[in-house]
Image (cartoon, helix red, strand yellow):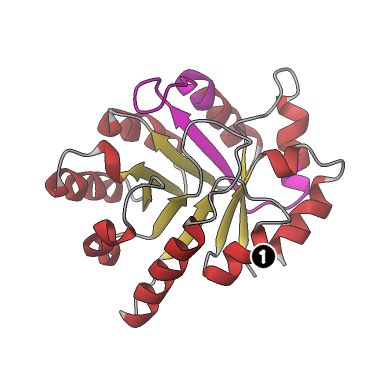
């Protein structure tokens, strides 16, 4: 059974409290915090996401799944680490070189937080193979990062399968998280390819009953 990380990117203003409680009652596994700085991606919601994450930390025991879509990764790690998230995921593409990737992995570990690396659709999955023994999760973007409600890029299914084969062949323990265009139509294919954590935002938030869709996505 897969885990569901519920993106709060599209939560309606003024409906935050009731939405967060409803998501918890629907038994999502994580709150997915999409953090954008207006530089790495065009949208800037940094302060709003920090505020939401801080509020969730006060009212809920569910773990935070922080996805940094930012240029200044180290400063964001220092700020969000104060909220004690379960995992912080940063983008491979935000790093200048492999040494910076290693340094950021070490920084997150120093805060005793699980480490994730995310890759954009155009980044070959082989690029991050060398880092897999040192991290806990790979977040494969199945849409271009920065906006909610996009359609899953079908070529990414093979990317998920390729990563899953490599993990199995090398006896690694790494989660495969998938973010972008996840709904009841795309989830079965993504799970079959090897993903074990699904990030869903619009599909859940547009449903009349969050629990029903969360259960269906998790099956």
Q: Relative to residue 50, is residue 184 depicted above or below?
A: below
Please state, as top left, top right, bottom left or bottom right, where the C terminus lies in the image. bottom right
- Report which quarter residue 12 is drawn in: top right
Please indicate whether residue 184 sits to the left or right of residue 120 in the image. right
Along the viewing direction, whichever of 21 and 206 lies nearer the viewer: 206
Residue 46, horizontal then vertical, whole percent: 45, 22
Q: Relative to residue 74, is residue 119 depicted above or below?
A: below
Residue at the (83%, 54%) spot, across then down? 212
Please state, as top left, top right, bottom left or bottom right, where the N terminus lies in the image. bottom right
Element class at badge 1: helix
Q: Residues within 10 Å of mark 1 (few under 14, many from 20)?
A: some
Is 38 included in the stretch rendered in magenta?
A: yes
What residue span does the magenta drawing correspond to?
23-50
Residue at the (80%, 46%) spot, across then down? 210
Q: Which residue is mark 1?
A: 188
Please indicate whether residue 60 sits to the left or right of residue 113 in the image. right
């Amino acid at each position: 059974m897969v885990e569901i990380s519920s993106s709060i990117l599209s939560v309606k203003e003024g409906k935050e409290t009731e939405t967060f409680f409803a998501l918890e009652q629907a038994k999502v596994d994580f709150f997915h915090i999409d953090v954008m700085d207006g530089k790495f991606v065009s949208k800037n919601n940094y302060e709003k996401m920090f505020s939401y994450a801080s509020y969730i930390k006060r009212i809920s025991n569910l773990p935070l799944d922080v996805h940094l879509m930012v240029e200044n990764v180290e400063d964001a790690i220092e700020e969000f680490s104060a909220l004690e998230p379960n995992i912080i995921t940063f983008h491979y593409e935000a790093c200048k070189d492999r040494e910076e990737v290693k340094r950021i992995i070490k920084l997150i570990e120093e805060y005793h937080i699980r480490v994730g690396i995310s890759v954009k659709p155009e980044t070959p999955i082989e690029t991050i193979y060398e880092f897999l023994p040192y991290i806990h999760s790979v977040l494969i973007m199945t849409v271009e990062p920065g906006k909610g409600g996009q359609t899953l890029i079908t070529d990414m299914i093979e990317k998920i399968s390729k990563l899953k084969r490599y993990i199995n062949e090398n006896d690694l323990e790494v989660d495969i998280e998938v973010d972008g265009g996840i709904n009841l139509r795309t989830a079965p294919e993504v799970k079959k390819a090897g993903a074990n954590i699904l990030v869903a935002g619009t599909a859940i938030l547009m449903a009349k009953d969050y629990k029903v869709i969360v259960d269906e996505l998790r099956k």
